[in-house]
Image (spheres, rainbow, N blue to C red):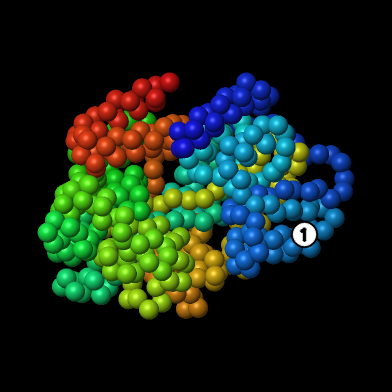
């Protein structure tokens, strides 16, 4: 499915390269000279629903407020999220949306194909945007490899360690692991295996999925160097995956773990394996905390930074872009600037789903969340950690999607025992070097 998505996006972006009249920046349009109220279509993150605390409904409340303030000048119409390929198809046909949510990893490719607007001049002139209020790496993830910004960061996520405090205490631990080596040792002591079958696992590295960012960040590995050269086949990178193989082997191997996983319950529901004690610890995005607050009210679960040898933790973000073919770029920027402002985030969006709190890339919003006791302890703990942690995400390249797909392909085989980590790392290095040279 993911390969089909990449292929579809590649085909559409190729069409942009052939048909776009823009040169260099992607700013192919200018605001219409016609007077009167301009309508801006704003495609927000999340589906269209009626839950009052959802992003869609919160965005409609913001739009109502914005439209009153800009009556006669700008009117924002909020719509729900579409798949990236559908959005790209729409804007390639000079259609709406004017503003839309996007995955950060699409930024370089969509910028080079002139699908999205270069925001450099708008940001430079803005008195609201305030670059110093953003987590540093979040801005990098909205830019091209050359550092040109084409998107605005919105929500942010890091990988956190969810753990069952009672399970850890049962194994003799009063706190979660702080390093990867501690994680390996705790997995051994927390896990219960009888007659070859797992009854309780300390930590399963590929649950809920194989994470290709958190582990390398934790070992200090880099995907590319300062000159843009691919640097996957290194000792630090291989440790990031060898540790995961060790964790699986300590649980009896990949197949044994797969058998166990089929009966552990459904993640983010009442039968979640951390909440029911089947797994002691699990790596999850902090955006999932609302679900754990909903279903874990009677469980002693807590959250901590993901174990790291370097003190670094991963970051990923959601972004908003402006359609390069919008007829009203100035008005679109005014709307996006207001939507992502410190004032709007605190007033309309900080509460998050079911009022459990939400984390945004603005430092001021993170600080407000960390110090507001109306929100659950766990989300405030994450926010406080984000204020002090060193954060880093995946490398910013023009071939990020291909890179991540190749890592998943090769390292999935390594974790399953179909090849070694060394063999996988060598293949990834060789294959991505070819992609990078295209």
Residue under numbered circle 1: 67
Q: Is residue 347 above or below residue 44?
A: below
Q: Is residue 308 left or right of residue 250?
A: right
Which residue appears at 14% of the width and 56% of the height? 196
Residue at the left extreme?
A: 195
Answer few, some or many: residues within 10 Å of disc 1's Cα (few below 14, many 20 plus, some between 14 and 19). Answer: some
Quick one: quadrant of the C terminus? top left
Q: How many marks?
A: 1
Where does the image place residue 319, in percent across and percent down from the top left?
A: 55, 48
Q: Quadrant of residue 380?
A: bottom left
Q: Is residue 275 above or below residue 236?
A: below
- Between 23 and 415, the one lying in front of the other is 415
Where does the image place residue 209, in percent across and percent down from the top left?
A: 35, 49
Q: Would you say residue 125 is visible in this rendering? A: no
Where does the image place residue 351, in percent across and percent down from the top left?
A: 55, 69
Where does the image place residue 200, in percent across and percent down from the top left?
A: 22, 64
Q: Would you say residue 38 is visible in this rendering? A: yes
Residue at the right extreme?
A: 35
Which residue appears at 35% of the width and 53% of the height? 208
Q: Quadrant of residue 86?
A: top right
Q: Quadrant of residue 293?
A: bottom left
Which residue appears at 25% of the width and 75% of the height? 166
Q: Identify the secondary structure beneath mark 1.
A: helix
Which residue appears at 41% of the width and 69% of the height? 270
- Between 40 and 355, the one lying in front of the other is 355
- Between 164 and 102, the one lying in front of the other is 164
């Amino acid at each position: 499915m993911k390969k089909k998505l990449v292929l579809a996006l590649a085909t559409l972006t190729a069409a942009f390269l052939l048909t776009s009249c823009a040169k260099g920046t992607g700013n192919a349009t200018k605001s219409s000279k016609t007077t009167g109220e301009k309508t801006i279509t704003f495609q927000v993150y999340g589906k269209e629903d009626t839950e009052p605390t959802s992003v869609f409904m919160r965005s409609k409340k913001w739009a109502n407020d914005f439209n009153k303030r800009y009556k006669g000048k700008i009117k924002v119409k909020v719509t729900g999220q579409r798949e990236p390929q559908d959005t790209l198809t729409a804007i390639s046909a000079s259609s709406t949306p004017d503003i839309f949510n996007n995955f950060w990893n699409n930024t370089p490719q969509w910028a080079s194909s002139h699908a999205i607007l270069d925001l450099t001049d708008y940001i430079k002139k803005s008195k609201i945007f305030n670059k110093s209020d953003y987590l540093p790496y979040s801005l990098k993830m909205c830019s091209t490899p050359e550092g040109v910004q084409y998107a605005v960061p919105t929500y942010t996520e890091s990988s956190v360690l969810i753990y069952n405090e009672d399970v850890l205490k049962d194994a003799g631990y009063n706190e979660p692991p702080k390093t990867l080596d501690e994680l390996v040792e705790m997995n051994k002591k927390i896990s219960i295996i009888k007659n070859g079958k797992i009854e309780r696992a300390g930590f399963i590295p590929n649950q809920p999925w194989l994470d290709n960012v958190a582990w390398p960040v934790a070992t200090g590995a880099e995907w590319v160097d300062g000159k843009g050269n691919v640097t996957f086949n290194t000792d630090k990178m291989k440790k990031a995956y060898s540790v995961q193989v060790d964790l699986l082997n300590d649980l009896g191997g990949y197949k044994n773990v797969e058998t166990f996983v089929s009966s552990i319950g459904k993640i983010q529901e009442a039968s979640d394996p951390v909440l029911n004690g089947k797994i002691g610890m699990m790596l999850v995005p902090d955006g999932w905390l609302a679900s754990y607050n909903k279903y874990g009210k009677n469980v002693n679960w807590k959250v901590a930074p993901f174990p790291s040898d370097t003190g670094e933790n991963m970051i990923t973000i959601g972004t908003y872009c402006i359609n390069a073919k919008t007829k009203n770029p100035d008005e679109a920027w005014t709307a996006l600037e207001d939507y992502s402002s410190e004032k709007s985030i605190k007033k309309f969006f900080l509460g998050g789903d079911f009022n459990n709190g939400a984390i945004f890339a603005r430092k001021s919003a993170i600080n407000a969340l960390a110090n507001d006791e109306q929100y659950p302890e766990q989300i405030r703990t994450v926010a406080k950690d984000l204020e002090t942690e060193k954060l880093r995400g995946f490398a910013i390249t023009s071939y990020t999607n291909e890179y991540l797909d190749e890592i998943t392909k090769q390292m999935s085989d390594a974790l399953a025992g179909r090849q070694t980590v060394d063999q996988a790392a060598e293949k990834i290095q060789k294959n991505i070097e070819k992609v990078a040279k295209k």
